[in-house]
Image (cartoon, helix red, strand yellow):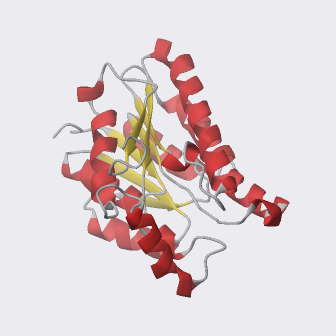
């Protein structure tokens, strides 16, 4: 029960890694609030997590999380833990990248994530923890992945700067960077037709030294560790949870 009576907000908590983390936070006593873009999956997730509250928000639209933050302020007066997990992906070779594709991904994965943290900060104070979902794509040069990779690399830089600026306020900021993970995003990645998804999944699996993809729960566990008091002397790190992709 590491999070008993803690107020936790999971941005992008309605599926995949975010949903697994929201469930795990709740199981350890947290008051869970979550956001997502799709009302149907928000409703499904909230129904599966006793006491959780869900709010529709698009992280690309600045200020769309205001309703969730107001509910947290009214109910608890503070936000103890922020998990910024929202993200989208697309594949395109360098010669085919369009400004529209670039802006769509960066508005969510970099711009949106940064300003979501900024918007939540007035509710956070001493002992607070922020965890951000990165990606091993930020350090892996994968052909066709330039849009996503640069957004996540920028987000890593933002996380380090946030950690440096907020350490004096007693707020820790860390990042968890998954490797290939079996989440719904693989089925809706831009530039990948549905019939190519099985082949992409096989390529991703073979790139992992463990020869399998991770599960959302395997990513959520390190998220909870970094958000907990067990990680009280850790800030500014990027923890690869990738089956050995980067390390081996």
Closest to the observer: 166 or 62? Answer: 166
User: Residue at point 29% right, 27% down?
Assistant: 231
In this rendering, is residue 186 above or below 36? Answer: below
User: Residue at point 37% right, 50% down?
Assistant: 242
Answer yes or no: is residue 30 visible. Answer: yes
Closest to the observer: 171 or 132? Answer: 132
User: Residue at point 54% right, 37% down?
Assistant: 120
User: Which quadrant would residue 18 be assigned to in this image?
Assistant: bottom left
Quarter the C terminus occupies: top left
In this rendering, is residue 40 above or below 153? Answer: below
Residue 31 percent across, percent down from the top left = 30, 47
Q: How many marks?
A: 0
In this rendering, is residue 128 above or below 108? Answer: above
Quarter the N terminus occupies: top left
Residue 129 percent across, percent down from the top left = 40, 31
| Residue farthest along the bottom direction in this orientation | 195
Residue 168 percent across, percent down from the top left = 48, 12
Residue 183 percent across, percent down from the top left = 41, 67
| Residue farthest along the top direction in this orientation | 168
Direction from residue 149 to residue 222 in the image, left or right: left
Direction from residue 83 to residue 65 in the image, left or right: right
Closest to the observer: 90 or 25? Answer: 90
Answer yes or no: is residue 113 visible. Answer: no
User: Residue at point 64% right, 58% down?
Assistant: 145
């Amino acid at each position: 029960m590491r999070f008993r009576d803690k107020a936790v907000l999971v941005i992008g908590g309605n599926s995949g890694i975010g949903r697994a983390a929201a469930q795990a936070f709740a199981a350890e006593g947290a008051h869970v609030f979550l956001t997502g873009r799709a009302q149907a999956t928000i409703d499904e997730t909230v129904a599966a997590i006793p006491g959780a509250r869900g709010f529709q928000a698009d992280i690309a639209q600045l200020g769309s999380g205001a309703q969730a933050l107001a509910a947290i302020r009214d109910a608890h007066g503070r936000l103890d833990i922020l998990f910024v997990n929202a993200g989208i992906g697309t594949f395109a070779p360098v010669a085919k990248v369009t400004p529209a594709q670039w802006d769509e991904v960066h508005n969510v994965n970099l711009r949106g994530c940064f300003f979501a943290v900024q918007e939540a900060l007035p509710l956070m104070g001493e002992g607070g923890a922020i965890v951000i979902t990165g990606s091993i794509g930020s350090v892996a040069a994968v052909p066709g992945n330039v849009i996503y990779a640069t957004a996540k690399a920028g987000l890593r830089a933002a996380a380090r700067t946030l950690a440096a600026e907020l350490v004096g306020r007693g707020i820790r900021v860390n990042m968890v960077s998954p490797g290939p993970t079996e989440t719904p995003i693989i089925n809706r990645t831009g530039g990948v037709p549905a019939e190519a998804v099985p082949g992409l999944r096989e390529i991703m699996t073979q790139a992992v030294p463990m020869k399998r993809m991770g599960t959302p729960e395997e990513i959520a566990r390190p998220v909870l560790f970094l958000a907990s008091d067990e990680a009280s002397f850790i800030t500014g790190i990027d923890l690869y949870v990738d089956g050995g992709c980067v390390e081996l």
